[in-house]
Amino acid sequence: MKKNKEIEKVIGKYKNEMCELSKYIYDNPELGFKEEKSSKAHVNYLKKHGFEVKENYLGFNTAFRADYILDPSYPTFAFLSEYDALPEIGHGCGHNLLGATDTTAGIVLKEFAKEYKLNVVVLGTPAEETSGVKVDMAKADTFDDIDFAMCTHPNFKWLQSGTSMAMDAIEFEFFGKTAHAAESPHEGLNALDAAVSFYTNCSYLRQQIKTSTRIHGIIKNGGEACNIIPEYTSVQYYIRALNMKDLNDLRQKIINCAEAAAVATGCKMKYHNFEKSYNNMITNNKMAQIFKDNTGNLGIDLQLKDIDSMGSLDMGNVSQVVPSINPYFSISKDKKVIAHTVEFREATLTDYAIKESMKMIEALVMTAIDIAKDENLQEEIKKEFYESIR
């Protein structure tokens, strides 16, 4: 739809509250599953504006579901809010502004719910940076009564919703036998040798994997003292690919590298996921095109995301159970700012970032209204979704 003065007026009404929410969460950074202040701030904002809120959602203390349901037969739009911070640098990924933007989009859309016959849900989704609760929501019945889902993210420029990498977070443990490293090394089984051999095997493997895949890890535990043959070490790896088939193939190759290291050193090996696995993002192209048209009406030229700069999102899991988009909005006008940095964190407070956030809210709301008005379009979006997940 074209720019709508009424939508802009409603957004303006909530601008100060949105800014206050973003700044409050910025000033009170909380790590995943510990976002008590941040979650409560979102909950209070939503309750104030007429949403029915379920806290402690799915048993997660800082997750919530906020509903504004007029009629179950109406299409239901969900906005997914994040608010977890990073260690030491706080909101270096901009989740203070992300959450405030998406929650406000839900509140603004609610004001048009009766006119356009739609329902609104806002989901508070903790711990995106580690073991995101969107994974649990996708596995549960959260999206059974939701028709369309939208999440956003701050960035140095506006980007279309695209794909993201599927990811496994796997910890490999090696078990050896202690011995005096000088007097009787032959009596020991060196778990550090196993860990180093495994790490080296993975580095050699890089030449034989697809350029679109990623493997990166650390030796988390490497021993206790130089004069003791280490009996225990652990290595953590993130393994990423553009789709689940490639991820599964790569996972097996990494496991083979670990098994080879254990055999070579006489150690035993175990592995497990230390964080939740993220599926790849499947953008619904029809939804994305409607969003692109609406940003175009706001004077924004959406660009494609560079495939070489993709990370992993728990929104990927959501996109495989409900039609979804995850576009990006700019928070830096004059220079490129990189996520997970102090510079990115500071950029979320600028007047420019707030202005662009307002545009994002407007584009999201216009997109939802366009879909709600057209039953044929709703069916086309759902048809594409079902074909994409076969």
Image: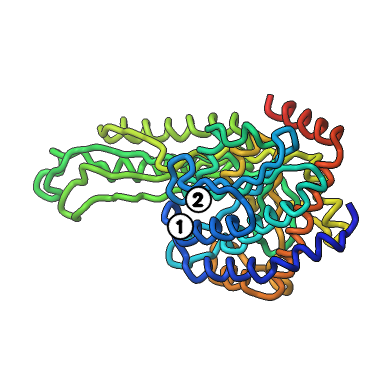
In the picture, measured across the screen, residue 44 lies left or right of residue 153, that is: left
Separation (CA) of disc 2 from disc 1: 7 Å
Q: Mark 1 and mark 2 in contact (Cβ < 8 Å)?
A: yes
Between 168 and 386, the residue placed more toward the observer is 386
Mark sitting on residue 11: none
The residue that label 1 is drawn on is 35
Q: Is 121 left, or right, of 6 in this rendering?
A: left
Q: Amino acid at mark 2?
A: Pro
Instruction: Measuring from the top left, give residue 282's x and y in whole percent.
Output: 68, 38
**Disc 2 element:** loop
Say if residue 312 shows up in the picture: no
Residue under the point 22% across and 38% down: 176
Tell me if mark 1 has few (under 14), some (14-19) or many (20+) residues whose alpha carbon lies within 10 angstroms of its own. Answer: many
Q: Answer left or right for 185 relative to 257.
A: left
Res 272 → quadrant: top left
Give the residue drawn at x 90%, y 56%. 2
Task: Tell me where residue 46 appears, x and y as whole percent.
Answer: 60, 56
- Amino acid of disc 1: Glu
Binning the other alpha carbons within 10 Å of mark 2 as few (below 14), some (14 to 19) or many (20 upward) gives many
- Is 34 placed above or below 229 here? below
Tell me which numbered mark, 2 or 1, is placed earlier along the sequence: 1
Q: Secondary structure at mark 1?
A: loop
Q: Quadrant of residue 36?
A: bottom left
Question: Could you tell me which residue is drawn at 59 percent across and 70 percent down?
Answer: 20
Q: Which residue is mark 2?
A: 126
Q: Does residue 122 appear anywhere in the picture? A: yes
